[in-house]
Image: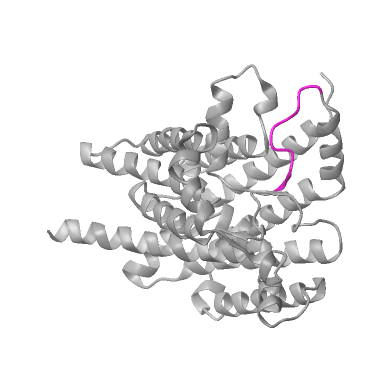
Amino acid sequence: MEFNVHHQVLTAVFVIAVIMGAVVNKTHFCTMGAVSDWMNIGDTGRMRAWVFAMAVALLGATGLEFSGAINLSGETFPPYRTANFAWPRYVLGGLLFGFGMVLASGCGNKTLVRVGSGNLKSLVVLLIGMAAAYLMLWSPLYEKAFLPWVQATTVNLSRRGMPSQHAGDVIAGLMGQAPSKTNNAAVALMAVVAMLIFVFKSKDFRASFDNILGGAVVGLAIVAGWYLTGGPLGQAWKDFAEMATDIPSRVQVQSFTFVSPMGDTARYLLDPAKFSLINFGVVALAGVILGSFLYAIASKTFRIEWFASAGDFGNHAVGGVLMGVGGVLAMGCTVGQAITGVSTLAIGSVLTFAAIVAGSVAAMKYQYWRMDA
């Protein structure tokens, strides 16, 4: 079989995902843990690592776009900068996902890392999340239960002089100014500076090699994904797909996200002979699991873990459903929206990040209430 450009892109994505999975395992980069540490013990180290990943991704994506190497205002998956600002889906989806990831003991990315480390509880979460995401993506569920009110509440920003959700376009539109590439880059750089000030003003964070490494590697992985799919190789990939007899799935400008790939993986597993269904997200999911597994074996931290009780199973099962449904509804997760989406500086991604954190806090407070009741 010819090793064509499609295989080149997927192989590169897989290698990056393997590295990310190993580093996330080693550094304990965890977005649910970031909220938990902040809430429970006032430790902001992992929260700063999360924000550092956003800053690295935003800086890299902005540089690539300003230089003309990629275009994130065109067709991307998901459509982060779409002018159709469906704010209720970002809020509700983020809240559901944030609540669910606490019940499931980790976000989508962390679930994959835990699976690679031998955690069978996370494997159950992954399977349930895959089923929920599949129903949202590839069944009438979204169209019947969500689309009517999503369409009814969507704000068309283009009618207000804002061609996209990029914060720079929105600010320019509110001020009655014409949007510009330079203005967008300036707004993005100001956001990066603000993030880096927040991150590095902490002496404890500056002294933590793992937090810096985790944030840097995850952020750079996002930048690499954008360049792979939006740069010269990505254009060749798109040209190849347009001429292919069996058109590959999701040949679009994109970077790492971990909920819709769960649904896409379920779709492929239902028809494993159809290799065209193996896409960016499917190989990214597999790569993170493998990377985590390799690190766990090398570090002798691989451990089989199972549910402590029926209640423990119930919490994780509900968490898997909420992450699958909420992640697809919000068009991303703590990586897909809160890092990859934020790297486009789409206001919907920032809103989703806030909603995920709020949902996580609500779930933790709910758990405390249950313990005290």
Q: What's the residue at 25%, 59% (across, down)?
A: 366
- Residue at 68% from the left image edge and 67% from the top image edge: 159
Relative to residue 98, is residue 343 drawn left or right? right
- For the question of whether residue 213 can be seen, the reply is no
Can residue 194 be seen? yes
Q: Position of residue 9 (x, y in %)?
A: 77, 38
Above or below — where is 188 with respect to 356?
below
Residue nearest the observer in this picture, 6 or 264: 264
- Foreground residue, 166 or 145? 145
Q: Is residue 197 left or right of residue 30?
A: right
Q: Residue at x 48, y 47 (%)?
A: 148
What is the span of residues highlighted in magenta in the rendered image? 245-254
Q: Is residue 100 left or right of residue 223?
A: left
Q: Is residue 247 magenta?
A: yes
Q: Is residue 194 above or below residue 341?
A: below
**Which quadrant would residue 310 be assigned to in this image?**
top left
Q: Quadrant of the N terminus?
A: top right
- Magenta part mainly helix, strand or loop? loop
- Colour scheme of the rendered structure: one colour
- Looking at the picture, how far across and down is residue 45, in whole percent? 47, 69
Q: Is residue 273 found inside the magenta-colored segment of the image? A: no
User: Where residue 122 sits: x, y (%)?
Assistant: 40, 39
| Near-viewer residue (192 or 142) | 142
